[in-house]
Image (cartoon, helix red, strand yellow):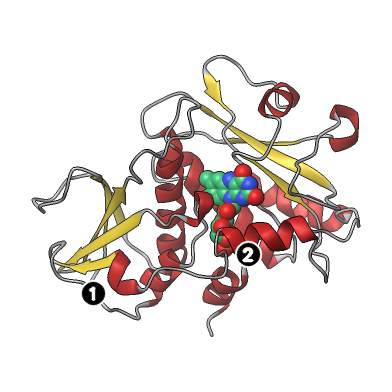
């Protein structure tokens, strides 16, 4: 398997760490990589390494972590997708170094983390991740959480991908689609849908009815940014926002298109 697909398919949310500190070498690599991260929306996403001990940071679902990384974004249109894209780039790189992470948007003391990250009124600090080296065994909380969200499972391709219109499922094994399928998403709801038309991949968000994070942004748009990140991680394409004429239902919102060479 190609190295990038290996990273995508072996990454999992790591919630139990072995208490080791991140080595200075790994930390330097991660910091250097973060400086290079861009997203197709050109919206700046600022990463902040937090001081776990000084600010007394923890999450009820995380054990044995070294520390946390947070990120902030200006409150502008498409900030969620930009955030999802950039944060996931960092996560994939961390995993390539053997550093475990978990997207945490719910199971945290939000005011405490926002303060630790010096969040201003014109910014959102949507997500944090613990970082550390994965433990060989999982805590009970970790096991139960993975089971409850079916963390090791994904919907079949035919439920996520479509050919020309939403009437025709696409049972494809293309790497770029498989990479999207194995993306992480809030509560593993997998709200991404893709309609492939010629060589254009149109990304849609199928909103989960009644699901809202209640914090001022749409958490499922972060999921779409992650999906776009996974796609472009394994396949080159031109990112555009130009809604095609494809009929969709009231829950399904067009997000962006990746246009690929034949
Ligand atoms: C935007 C977002 C928010 C998330 N928030 C949390 C959270 O608050 N707590 C948690 O334990 N996991 C959280 N997760 C992790 C998901 O539950 C996880 O990605 C999903 O169950 C799939 O499992 P996997 O990452 O191991 O593939 C979040 C994921 C995303 C993308």
Point 79% across, 65% down: residue: 138
Q: Earlier in the sequence, mark 1 or mark 2?
A: 2
Of 14 and 3, the residue lying toward us = 14
Please say whether residue 257 is visible from this viewpoint: yes
Under circle 1, the secondary element is: loop
* Quadrant including the C terminus: bottom left
* Quadrant including the N terminus: bottom right
**Picture coordinates of residue 178 (x, y %)?**
41, 73
Under circle 2, the secondary element is: loop
Residue identifier under label 2:
12
Point 37% across, 38% down: residue: 210
Point 52% across, 75% down: residue: 5
**Picture coordinates of residue 122 (x, y %)?**
52, 16
Mark 1 surroundings within 10 Å by alpha-carbon count, few (fewer than 14), some (14 through 19), many (20 or more): some
Indicate whether 14 appears above or below 40: below
Residue identifier under label 1:
170
């Amino acid at each position: 398997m190609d190295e990038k697909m290996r990273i995508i398919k072996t990454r999992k949310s790591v919630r139990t760490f072995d208490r080791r500190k991140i080595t200075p070498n790994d930390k330097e690599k991660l910091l250097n990589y973060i400086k290079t991260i861009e997203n197709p929306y050109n919206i700046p996403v600022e990463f902040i390494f937090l001081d776990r001990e000084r600010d007394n940071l923890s999450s009820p679902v995380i054990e044995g972590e070294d520390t946390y990384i947070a990120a902030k974004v200006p409150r502008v249109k498409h900030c969620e997708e930009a955030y999802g894209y950039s944060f996931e780039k960092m996560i994939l790189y961390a995993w390539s170094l053997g550093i475990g992470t978990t997207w945490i948007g719910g199971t945290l003391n939000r005011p405490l983390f926002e303060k630790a990250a010096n969040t201003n009124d014109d910014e959102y600090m949507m997500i944090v991740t613990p970082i550390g080296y994965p433990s060989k065994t999982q805590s009970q909380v970790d096991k139960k959480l993975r089971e409850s969200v079916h963390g090791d499972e994904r919907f079949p391709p035919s439920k996520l991908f479509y050919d020309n219109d939403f009437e025709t499922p696409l049972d494809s094994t293309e790497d770029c689609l498989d990479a999207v399928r194995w993306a992480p998403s809030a509560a593993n709801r997998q709200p991404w849908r893709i309609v492939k038309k010629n060589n254009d991949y149109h990304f849609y968000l199928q909103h989960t009815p009644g699901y809202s994070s209640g914090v001022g942004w749409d958490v499922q748009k972060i999921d779409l940014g992650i999906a776009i990140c996974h796609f472009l991680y394994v396949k080159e394409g031109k990112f555009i926002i130009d809604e095609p004429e494809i009929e969709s239902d009231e829950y399904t919102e067009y997000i962006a298109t990746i246009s690929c060479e034949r």
